[in-house]
Amino acid sequence: MNPNVLQTPIEYLKGVGPNRGELLRKELGIHTYQDLLNLFPNRYIDKTRFYKIKELQRNNADVQVLGKIIHLKTIDQKKGKRLVASFVDDTGKMELVWFRGQKWIRENLKINEPYVIFGRVNYYNGFSMPHPEMELLSTYEKKLRTAMQPVYPSTEKLAARGVTNKTTSNIIQQLFLETNGKFLDTLSPAILNELKLIPKSEALFNIHFPKSQELLAKSQFRLKFEELFYIQLQLISKNMLRKRKIKGYPFYQVGTFFNEFYNDHLPFELTGAQKRVIKEIRTDLGSNAQMNRLLQGDVGSGKTIVALMTMLLAIDNGFQACLMAPTEILATQHYHGLVALLIDMPITIQLLTGSTKTSKRKEIHADLQNGQLHILIGTHALLEDKVKFHNLGLAIIDEQHRFGVAQRSKLWHKNEQPPHILVMTATPIPRTLAMSLYGDLDISVIDELPPGRKSIKTVHRYDSNRLKVFQFIRDEIKKGRQIYVVYPLIQESEKMDYKDLMDGYESIVREFPMPDYQISIVHGQMKPADKNFEMNRFVKGETQIMVATTVIEVGVNVPNASVMIIESAERFGLSQLHQLRGRVGRGAEQSFCILMTSFKLSNDSKTRLETMVRTNDGFEIAEVDLKLRGPGDIMGTQQSGVLNLKIADIVKDNDILKLARQFALKLLKDDPTLAKEENQVIRFAYSQLMKYKNIWNYIS
Ligand code: ADP
Ligand code: MG
């Protein structure tokens, strides 16, 4: 069949027309025949089974019952009326209920005739079924039916405008009629054979009209594989193209600075994971291609030292390096940390943030341009156009998820030839998600914590136990430890949160009075200078308690702090809780994390708290987070479009994803431009996808 037919606007399909066409476009994003063909059912219902009324269960989902209506009545309710039918079979009685379309039903329903009804049952003083699908037994028997009935995605608006599941199914049937159900295959014979996949036409038919469970499973597998395969193909070829097209500065030398630091100044033995990652980075930097690497490592896994050693490689080769952090506190801390590590080495390093004074700023700009400055640390301020480098060879971004792709690309343009890029993130992304999201980045993982860390003990306490918690704080302070108390600050309700924070602060000041106790407070509404001042008092150990909002979340390093108390912990997301907890457990002492909540907890909150108490493993936590929130919510991935999956599920279809990636890699390695005869099927399908797939994303 001519593939262009599939690009026909949907309203031309018989049974659709302009009105429904408009509705389908708006509600489901269906613009063309192709889009409709790819509207895959969410689930299937087994309509081979008939239930008896007495068999119905309170939690029954969709059931099919054979019986008849013996009585019909209209009942007044607060708003409008409802139509209620008494429906019986030889075992019992239930009610059918309509809130809309009552006139039509009243006029058309036949009393005392056998009907097959289908729908979801409710239980309230007996069973009822709102808005059932109904068919006279006589009609039902005449129809050819498959065992599995698809249930299509729908919206309230579609339902209200009469586009029911049956309608959708019917127009898809029409589509198969008009196209003969013959579709070009989109995978090569080689792949079909190797994986024993069923042909495209067969898969599409059975996904909509399954002939059997077995064929349905095969169809699902084939279509999921295909979907993931083309995403991987796109990501991998983008990556390969970049490597081919975009030259990087080769850092051939592992020179004096790197070696001197490694031999004389490294304050500890590197972990195996750190060594491995540095090796991966060195390999990238030594090649002619530009590095674009994502470095994942749980909080406290020691990414900073890896960043430093990478910067030394740049300097060894005559280049400058920069490190960008999302907050001023974090940039400042990086700066001081790196200055301390580099103290005995002739390396120049500066800090540039929003609050850098103009005179200092001018000095930095000048030194940057004449090449005297080796390393620049800073916030977004680095991205300003005025900041020009002599020769930037490496840009490191800490805590990726706070920066967008746009900012990454701004760094790219800080130089004629883009610098090598290392993105560091402490929010572990499940590997599967990372592969899909950052398929165009190479990934390194630090999966080992420095030795001697005691794992943090985490407990969940209710607000009613506060006095005990205060006593615990007192004991820890007596031992010389420091404490964080963190309050949620969520933008929309900032004022209220701010009040919570101040109330909390006051109650802590009351409980821990001066001069025995000193307390710091840091929140987003403070001036940067005040924030720094308070932060520094805590870093220096002058205050024992730090009351803060989540500004403290990212990167701050105070090894003597051993207790993290998180107030209203039920309001935080999992990855945020994990980030916060990572602020403690950095010293030699046993550390604690106390999650304070009220008694009112949703199921999701309970799962989050239980997960935190159970494990310290950031990757495990990320997996749970992904399951709770779905990939769309994680790190604003909605925009990436990569996850706009039609049939595959990034979490559940992990194995298929791996397989798809493996096949895509193999294919592109063997035939990078898809020039070979046997790959023309894929080349064509891919070009069609590129041509049509994303258009509507931009428009709607
Ligand atoms: P993160 O990955 O969260 O940025 P950091 O780089 O801040 O972690 O490191 C956390 C702490 O662990 C720092 O105090 C750092 O000095 C220390 N550290 C890092 N690597 C090692 C190591 N190999 N052995 C011992 N301590 C280390
Ligand atoms: Mg860090």
Image (cartoon, rainbow, N blue to C red):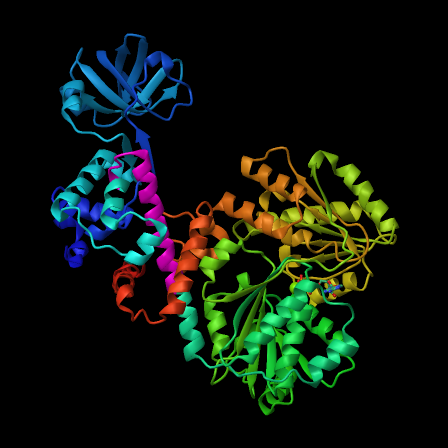
Image quarter for ligand 2: bottom right
Q: Is residue 520 left or right of residue 12?
A: right
Q: Is residue 211 magenta?
A: yes
Position of 118 relative to 635 (above/below): above
Q: Is residue 419 left or right of residue 44?
A: right
Position of 663 relative to 92 (above/below): below
Task: Determine which quarter of the picture holds residue 537.
Answer: bottom right
Residue in front for this viewpoint, 35 or 474: 35
Instruction: Please name the predominant secondary structure of the magenta segment in the image.
Output: helix
Residue, far bottom: 370
Task: Determine which quarter of the picture holds residue 595.
Answer: top right
Q: Is residue 61 magenta?
A: no
Part of the protein shown in magenta: 208-234
Q: Position of residue 378 (x, y in %)?
A: 61, 74
Q: Is residue 93 left or right of residue 466?
A: left
Residue in front for this viewpoint, 24 or 674: 674
Position of 124 relative to 149 (above/below): above
Q: Position of residue 392 (x, y in %)?
A: 56, 83
Q: Position of residue 12 (x, y in %)?
A: 12, 50
Q: Position of residue 248 (x, y in %)?
A: 50, 81
Regarding residue 700, the answer to whether it shows in the image is: no
Residue in front for this viewpoint, 567 or 234: 234
Regarding residue 305, the answer to whether it shows in the image is: yes
Residue at 37% x, 17% y: name it. 56
Q: Quadrant of the N terminus?
A: bottom left
Q: How many marks are shown on the rendered structure?
A: 0
Residue at 20% x, 48% y: name it. 22
Q: Is residue 585 left or right of residue 441?
A: right
